[in-house]
Amino acid sequence: MSGVLRAFTIGLTAFLTVVDLFATQAILPALTQAYGVTPAAMGFAVNASTIGMAAGSLAIALFGRSLDRRRGILLSLVLLSVPTALLATMPSLAVFTALRVLQGLCMSTAFALTLAYLGEHTSAADTAGAFAAYITGNVASNLFGRLLAAGVVDHLGLAANFYVFAALNLSGAILVWFSVERTKPMSQVDVSGASPFASWLAHLGNPALRAAFLTGFLILFAFIGTFTYVNFVLVAPPFSVGMMMLGVVYFVFLPSVVTTPFAGRFVARFGTRPTLWISFAVAIAGLPLLLSSVFAAVLAGLALVAVGTFFAQATATGFVGRAATTDRGSASGLYLASYFLGGLAGSAVLGQLFDVLGWTACVAGIGASLVLGMVLAFRLEIRPAACPSPAFAP
């Protein structure tokens, strides 16, 4: 397989794995109207997938060594299509929430096993390109997944949207079937015998790693708070954006598709702390624009928040890989669990601010989380060694 085709395949696998995660945010206003609930209630239900993402990340950190990578990815993507299709039945809000949790569990399992496969089965020379391709696929899923969801709902309705995404899940399984080679579980390759719980205690006893875990929490807290509740601002006056146009709005992620893969090089040259400070500063610079009554200004603000948070996420993930002295897999699992729990907290806390006090208060809460992220960067030690390519973006 040529280098370009291989990179495209890796990126497409990432896209099809997590496309369900944030695409549903683009149709939040339609779902809120269909269910007759508040934005905060629907926002929590949609973002409940992060509960499953966190649980799946921890499970893979505990039991991932004994799992066949290819078989696990295949099974996760096939199973993912089931709750996705069931969402088309428009169940009660409680069942909708539970199905989103199941989606998150399947997505995170496939996602974590794919990262493990790439780390274990690419040469040192190819690792940077492989992770860069995977990052780009994740970022692209944020853009095109939202765009697709908005377009399908606008033309075919809510039920059709979930059937389309179930078909995408199965397409991902087919792609993995033909592109991922069979490998032995790591328990047959690495017999160090170290307990995952002992590794977790070691990671949590490391102040720099604790700060990194909390940094991840704050990044998705801010990201989900922004891109969940801005939808309700855009569909209301003075913007009154239609469903299809709401999908087009997410072209604001396009700059991030270009910038995020360079995070590793930026860290290698300038260090972790400066990179995080700049990333958070870029995101903070976009917040005042989100309060503007000018549509173009709001789009610019969203683009800055996206570029900043994606870059910060790539930087923080890379730092965890360097700072963990033992069992990097469990460290990554703890980081991802904290990251996704931050998304759930952002949906709940900022949703209440939005419902009770409005968009300005919500943006203030987003700003507070980003500022705290800048403060936490002081706790992250700068390592002189070159940074490995970051393995994940929102």
Image (spheres, helix red, strand yellow):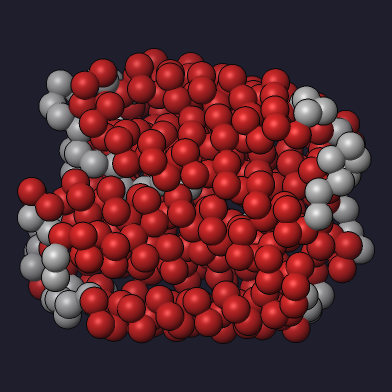
The quarter holding residue 174 reads bottom left
Front residue of 265/364: it is 265
Q: Please report the residue visible at 76 percent of the width from the left and 67 percent of the height from the top.
A: 154
**Left or right: 252, with 310 as reference point:** right
Q: In this view, does 168 lie above or below 11?
A: below
Is residue 262 visible in the rendered image? The answer is yes
**Image coords of residue 267 (percent x, y):** 27, 26
Q: Please report the residue visible at 57 percent of the width from the left and 35 percent of the height from the top.
A: 303
Front residue of 235/323: it is 235
Q: Please report the residue visible at 16 percent of the width from the left and 51 percent of the height from the top.
A: 127
**Left or right: 115, with 123 as reference point:** right
* Tag count: 0
Front residue of 14/322: it is 14
Is residue 202 visible in the rendered image? The answer is no
**Image coords of residue 240 (percent x, y):** 86, 46
Question: Which image quarter holds the N terminus?
Answer: bottom left
Q: Please report the residue visible at 53 percent of the width from the left and 37 percent of the height from the top.
A: 306
The quarter holding residue 390 reads top left
**Image coords of residue 326 (percent x, y):** 18, 44
